[in-house]
């Protein structure tokens, strides 16, 4: 293993090491010096906001409608209030993305205008290419596992002096043998840089921002979740999969891909539980594993991937189809109404939601033979196995699969409680966990907006519309009624928004999300239905109109995990993003303080009553969306 890699990975000898509460506290303190003495309220109120001069200059050019912003905020005063401070926003990439996918009960043809891979897909044929040589038997594509692979590995995005090796006898060298030849310098190709100009190429988004993207630089930074010292070539993947990877424009694996793929692909197959920040490439990791393990010659489902929402299942299917486009492997979207009781499914990979899989499996072998399933993937695994979530259905499905199935669990969040479930769900699993305090990416600038009451939240949102529609934004609400109500009011005011939630018909849901992916709609007002997994690269702002809450036994607490996933809809794969959470009373103020405390990251406070702060808000938002020039 390269030196730089040693600097980024801590290994652990036992599950208990990672699960230990005290250990968690130590990690929290060590990784977040500010967290030791962290006082959310004082942090936010004692600071003063200073956008970078670069950003300020840029904003002058943009000449945002601050005046109109102010005039639309109800209860606006010019009372001097302490102005928050923020670090200058870091740079980040922007990659174009466009288009939609249609729902299909069978594998769709590759879509040349995929929203998922944007520009990278230029040149991909619109018809599925027939490839003469299907991949060989799965085993031939897999690497050999290190003898110590069944041990937890902890991913850390921090300095080497903040890490410790907890496990003897295991280091990355265990599978470094598979990655010989990797370019360890990480400075592979600065020509990878994309500019915002490419966003305009499709005519979808036009603005005058000049955002330079240096993905190669991000992937060379050991502190970045995108860091990689190795290459896809070194993973010994089948050539047809390599073609798929190149076609979607991936140059190097991200950190989670680099760590997880050798473990996933090793033989005999082993379970894996993997945690990595939102937008860091977990989908491609489990996708490559499924595609590597399926025998294209066997016309029956051999891998199942479950996701908590129809929207996410569709998105995953599109990723599998794109990366697998040079293989003979086919997929089936297993969502309500996508299958018929009398019709067998002969596709190789099922991607869907748990309820549909339960229905299919309740038909015995009539729809497909569960005995042929080799890989069982749970995306958003904490949600999929949680007792309060979809756990019952997921467990029922698992019980109908062969004992030797490879269980693969991925998420950006695993509470300690859920880690225990995960461990029993996927026994003897290799485990990759983030340290507490490292679960959100720094590229997302987090703010909170002090409003005067529930109604003034709406006024603030309306005032923010111009900012929100510079790029694209998602507004999360607690209820479907709130989402619809806000969307109606904004529409009546002449704004272009769409609302999406579970009460809408399936086709309508697909159309709304496709419209948003295509940037036909700039602002999406929604509930938690798209809080997890949805990858729309051009989303540069997330608004938490309501604080996400857990409601367990009448104990209303902020839902930290949902907050993390919601804000993770921006800042995808190193891009810049900005999140704003609205605070309007003591309860929501306490909630936001709690979230800051738990995440160990202060948020910048903006006061909706203050002209100065609103000015700063607009600047902060724009700076977060643009990046330095
Ligand atoms: N190696 C890579 N190089 C470049 N881009 C990549 C790479 N891997 C993934 N991506 C891109 O990064 C984006 C985020 O990936 P993905 O959706 O898999 O994130 P995730 O970790 O599953 O996030 P979430 O936790 O929100 O579900 C996608 O647009 C994907 O195409």
Image (cartoon, rainbow, N blue to C red):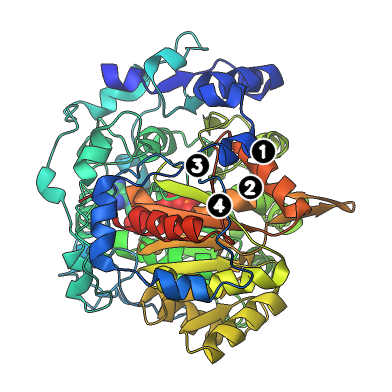
Pointer 2 with pointer 3, Cβ within 8 A = no
Q: Which mark is residue 415?
A: 1
Which residue bears the numbered disc 4?
80
Which residue bears the numbered disc 2?
561
Q: Is mark 4 within 8 Å of ligand 1?
A: no
Give the total number of marks visible in the rendering: 4
Could you tell me which secondary element the residue under label 2 belongs to? Answer: helix
Horizontal and vertical percent position of residue 229: 25, 30
Pointer 2 with pointer 4, Cβ within 8 A = no
Is residue 39 in view from this perspective? yes
Could you tell me which secondary element the residue under label 1 belongs to? Answer: loop
Viewed as shown, does residue 199 lie left or right of 222? left
Which residue bears the numbered disc 3?
440
Front residue of 546 and 164: 546
* Residue drawn where x is 50% and y is 34% of the image: 438
The CA span between labels 2 and 4 is 35 Å
Horizontal and vertical percent position of residue 232: 24, 41
The CA span between labels 1 and 4 is 41 Å
The CA span between labels 3 and 4 is 32 Å
Horizontal and vertical percent position of residue 545: 62, 64
* Residue drawn where x is 43% and y is 48% of the image: 444
Mark positioned earlier in the residue sequence (1 or 4): 4
Mark positioned earlier in the residue sequence (3 or 4): 4
Horizontal and vertical percent position of residue 388: 77, 53
Viewed as shown, does residue 527 lie left or right of 496? right
Pointer 3 with pointer 4, Cβ within 8 A = no
């Amino acid at each position: 293993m390269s030196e730089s890699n040693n600097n980024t990975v801590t290994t652990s000898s036992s599950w208990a090491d990672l699960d230990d509460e005290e250990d968690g506290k130590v990690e929290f303190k060590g990784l977040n010096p500010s967290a030791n003495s962290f006082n959310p309220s004082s942090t936010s109120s004692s600071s003063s906001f200073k956008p970078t001069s670069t950003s300020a200059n840029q904003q002058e050019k943009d000449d945002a409608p601050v005046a109109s912003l102010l005039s639309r905020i109800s209860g606006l005063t010019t009372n001097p209030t302490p102005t928050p401070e923020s670090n200058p926003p870091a740079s980040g990439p922007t990659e174009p993305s466009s288009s939609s996918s249609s729902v299909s009960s069978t594998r769709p043809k590759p879509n040349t205008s995929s929203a998922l891979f944007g520009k990278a897909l230029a040149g991909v044929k619109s018809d599925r290419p027939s490839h003469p040589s299907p991949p060989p038997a799965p085993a031939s594509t897999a690497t050999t596992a290190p003898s110590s692979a069944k041990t937890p590995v902890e991913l850390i995005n921090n300095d080497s002096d903040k890490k410790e090796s907890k496990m003897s006898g295991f280091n990355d060298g265990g599978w470094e043998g598979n990655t010989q030849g990797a370019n360890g310098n990480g400075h592979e190709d600065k020509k990878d840089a994309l500019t915002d100009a490419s966003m305009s190429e499709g005519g979808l988004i036009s603005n005058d921002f000049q955002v330079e993207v240096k993905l190669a630089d991000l992937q060379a930074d050991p502190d970045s979740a995108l860091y990689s010292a190795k290459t896809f070539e070194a993973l010994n993947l089948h050539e047809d999969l390599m073609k798929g990877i190149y076609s979607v424009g991936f140059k190097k694996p991200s950190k989670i891909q680099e760590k997880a793929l050798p473990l996933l692909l090793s033989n005999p197959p082993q379970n894996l539980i993997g945690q990595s920040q939102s937008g860091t490439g977990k989908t491609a990791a489990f996708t490559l594993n499924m595609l590597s393990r399926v025998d294209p010659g066997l016309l029956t489902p051999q891998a199942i991937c479950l996701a908590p929402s129809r929207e996410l299942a569709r998105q995953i299917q599109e990723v599998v189809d794109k990366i697998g486009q040079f293989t003979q492997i086919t997929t089936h979207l297993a969502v309500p109404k996508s299958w018929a009781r009398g019709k067998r499914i002969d596709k190789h990979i099922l991607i869907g939601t748990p309820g549909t899989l339960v229905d299919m499996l309740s038909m015995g072998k009539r729809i497909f033979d569960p005995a042929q399933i080799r890989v069982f993937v749970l995306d958003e695994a904490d949600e999929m196995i949680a007792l309060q979530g979809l756990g019952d259905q997921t467990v029922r499905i698992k019980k109908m699969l062969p004992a030797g199935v490879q269980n693969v669990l991925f998420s950006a969040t695993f509470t300690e409680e859920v880690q225990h479930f995960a461990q029993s769900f996927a026994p003897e699993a290799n485990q990759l966990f983030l340290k507490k305090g490292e679960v959100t990416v720094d590229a997302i600038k987090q703010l909170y907006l002090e409003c005067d009451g529930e109604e003034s939240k709406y006024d603030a949102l309306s005032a923010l519309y111009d900012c929100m529609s510079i790029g694209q934004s998602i507004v999360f609400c607690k209820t479907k009624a709130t989402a619809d109500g806000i969307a109606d009011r904004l529409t009546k005011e002449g704004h272009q928004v769409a609302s999406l939630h579970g009460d809408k018909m399936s086709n309508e849901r697909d159309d709304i999300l496709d419209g948003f992916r295509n940037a036909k709609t700039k602002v999406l007002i929604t509930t938690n239905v798209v809080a997890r997994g949805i990858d729309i690269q051009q989303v540069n702002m997330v608004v938490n109109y309501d604080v996400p809450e857990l409601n367990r036994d009448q104990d209303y607490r902020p839902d930290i995990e949902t907050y993390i996933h919601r804000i993770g809809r921006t800042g995808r794969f190193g891009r810049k993003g900005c999140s704003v959470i609205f605070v309007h009373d003591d309860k929501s103020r306490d909630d936001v303080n709690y979230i800051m405390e738990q995440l160990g990251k202060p948020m910048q406070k903006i006061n909706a009553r203050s002209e100065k702060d609103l000015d700063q808000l607009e600047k902060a938002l724009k700076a977060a969306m643009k990046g330095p020039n």
